[in-house]
Image (cartoon, rainbow, N blue to C red):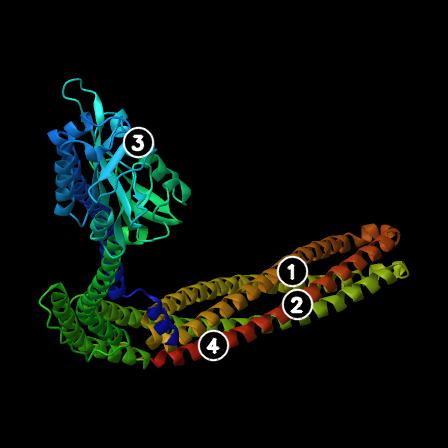
Amino acid sequence: MKHSEKRTNSKKKIADEILYQIGKSVVIVFLLIAVAAVYMVGWLSVTSKKTELTEESNAAANQLTGFLQQYIKSVEQLAVNPEIKYVMMNTNAGDDIWQTEKMDTVMENLVHIANTDSENVMAVWISDLDASILTQSDGFTSEEGWDITGRGWYPCITEKRTFLTEPYIDSSTGKMILSAAAPVYDNVTGSVLGAVGMDISLDHMTKIMTEYKIGRNGCVLLLSENGMFLYHPQNDIVQKNIKDIDVSQNLVNAVMSKSDKFLKYKIEGHTQYGSLQHAGNTGYIVLSSLPLSEYYAMLAVMIGVLILIFIIGMVLITISIRKSAANLTKPILELNHTAQQLAAGNLDVSLSITSEDEIGSLGESFQKTVNRLKEYIVYIDETSEALAQIAAGKLSVNLKHDYVGEFQKIKAALLNISSSMNQVMLGINESSERVSVGAAELATASQTLAEGAETQAASIQQLAATTNTVANQVENSRKDAETSAKMTAEATKMIVKNQEKMKLMMDAMNEINLTSQKVVGIIQAIEDIASQTNLLSLNASIEAARAGDAGRGFAVVASEIGKLALESSKAAITTRELIQISIEEINKGNSIAVSAMNSLKESVDAVDHVNELIQETAENAATQAENMKQLRLGIEEIAHGVQDNSATSQETSATSEELASQAEKLNKMVQKFQLCS
C-alpha cells in the first residue's frame, strides 16, 4: 500500500502540468513583451534624453547667442557713429583725444550706453589706431606708450570684423569679462580708423547657465572658443582649458572641430552624456552634461517596473491557473478515489460531481457504471454459490437469473463445466467399474496360471527324476548289455509310459501358452483402461483449473486418479513383460519337450529293433549316456523356467489384486459426487 501511494505521489499532477504548460507559454510571451518593452522604453528613454540634452544645449546656446548678439549689434551701431568717426579722424599720434572736437559728445554717448545696462556692461570704450589710445566710459584713458596691438580685441581691426574676445579677469574689479569689439572705418577711404567696444561681465552668462537644470544632477557647461571652461559646477575646473584637465579625447576633438554633435564623454573619470552646440558665430560653446546613471535612470526604472509587473503578473497568473486547475482536478480526484474504492472491491460508492462540462459527463458515466456493477453483485453471488456447490460435489447446478453482457459468458461457462464434469465423472465411474471387474478377472486368471505353473513344476520335477533314471539305466546298459534283451520289453513299456507323460506335459505347456496369451490380452485391456483413465483425469484437471478455487478439491481427486491410472499402466506393462518372458521360456520348454518326444519315439523304434541292434547297443552306450546327460540339463532348464513362470504368475496375481483394490478406491471417490443421469 505504501509503495502504491509512493508511486502515485511520484506521478505528475494535472495542476502542475497545466501550470507548467500554460506558465511556460506565459513566461515566453512575457519575456518577449518584456524584451520588446525594454527595447522600446530604452529607445524612447535614450532618445528623449538625447533630445532633452540637445534641446537644453540649443536653448542655452540660443539664449547665450541672443545675449551676446545685442552687444555685438550695439558695438556695430556704435562703430558707425559719426561723432566717433570724426574724433578718430581728427586725432593723430601724440594728440590728446580729449582735446578733439566732439569728444565730449562721444563720451556722453558712451556713458549713456554704459548706464543703460550697468549690470552687464562694465565699460564702453573707443580706441584710435594711429594715436594708439583708448578712452572708456568710466573716465579711464590709456597713458602714453599704450600699445593697441597687444589687446585681445585687436583682431577685429586686422580681420575687419566684429570680434568677441576670450574671457579675461578685469584688473580693477577682479571679475571675468569679455570684450565685444567692432572696427571703425573711414567712409571715404574705407581704411580702419580704430575700434569701439564694450567690456561685458560674464556673471550674467554664468547665471544663464546655472538656470539650466537637466534631471537631478545634469547641467549646461560654457566653454570659450579655445576650450576654456567659463562655467562648470565644480569651481576648480572654471578658467581651465579642456586640454589641461582629465577629459576624453573625443570631447577635445569635438571642441576643436567646431562642429555640433551629441556625444558620450568623460570628465574627471565620470562618464557623461551631452550635446555640444556653438552659440551662433560668437565662438562660445555650450555643452549639456548628464551623468551616465541618470542618463539611463528612466530605462533602469522602467526595467525595474517591468520586472515587478512581470513578477506580479506571474504570481497572479500562477494563482489563477492553480485555482482553475484545482477546480478542474477536484472532480477528477473524486473520480480517482471512487475508482480506487472499486478496485478495492467496494461497490457501495456514490459520486457528487456537479460539473456541466466533459468531466461532469464522465462522472455521470462513471455513476452509471457503478450502478451497473451493483447489479452485477447478484450475478457474482449466484456464480459463487454455484461454484461452492460444485466444490461440495454437487455437479448439477441451476442458474436462475438472466445474465447480461459479459456475464452471459460466465453463465454459459458454468453450465458447460457442470455438464462436462458430470459426463466426465459418469465416464470415470463406468470405467472404474470396468477396471474393477477386469482386475478381478485378471486376479482369477493369474491365480489359475499360478496353480498351473505349480503343477507344471511338479511334472517337470518328475520328468527330471525319470530322465535321471533313464540316464542311470543307459549308464548301466554298458554293464548289462548281456541282460538288455530281457529288459527290452520292460524298457519298451516304460518308454511308452514316458511318452504318454511327455504328451501330457506338452498339452499342459500348450495350455500354459494359451493362458499366457489371454493374460497378455487382459493386460492390454488394462493398459487401454489406464490410458483412458489418465486422459479423463487430465480433462478433469483442466476443468478443475478453469473452475478456480472452487474446483481445487476435484483437481486433487483428478490428480489421484491420474496417478492411479499411471501406476496401473506401469504394473500392467511389467506384468506383460514378465508373461512375455514366461511365454518365451515355455516355447523353449516346448522345443525341448518336442525334442525329448522325438527321442522317446526313437527309443521306441530302437527297442523294437533292440534285438537286432543289441550288439550295437554296447558300442553306442557311451554315446547314449552323453545324450542323456544333455537331455537332463535341458529338462532342468525347463524346470527352472516353469518355476519362474510360477513366480511371475503369483506376482501378476498380487498386482491384479492391488489393481482391484485401487479400482474400488476410485469408485468410492467418484461416489462422493452427486451425478445426474
Q: N-terminal of the two: label 1 or label 4?
A: 1
Residue count near mark 1 (Cα–Cα under 10 Å), binned few <14, some 14–19, many ≥20: many
Secondary structure under the numbered disc 2 in the rendered image: helix
In the rendered structure, are the residues bearing label 3 and label 4 in contact, judged by CB atoms less than 8 Å apart? no
Q: Nearer the viewer, mark 3 or mark 4?
A: 3
User: Furthest residue to the front?
Assistant: 99
Compute the Cα span from label 4 to label 2: 27 Å
Residue at the disc numbered 3:
148
| Residue 307 position in % (x across, y down) | 26, 59
* Nearer to us in this view, 554 or 197: 197
Residue at the disc numbered 4:
662
Residue at the disc numbered 1:
585
Q: Nearer the viewer, mark 1 or mark 4?
A: 4
Q: N-terminal of the two: label 1 or label 2?
A: 1
Compute the Cα span from label 1 to label 2: 9 Å
Amino acid on which disc 4 is placed: Gln
Q: N-terminal of the two: label 2 or label 3?
A: 3
Q: N-terminal of the two: label 3 or label 1?
A: 3
In the rendered structure, are the residues bearing label 1 and label 2 in contact, judged by CB atoms less than 8 Å apart? yes
**Residue 644: mark in rendering:** 2
Where is 615 relative to 447, above or below?
above
Q: N-terminal of the two: label 3 or label 4?
A: 3
| Residue 234 position in % (x across, y down) | 34, 53
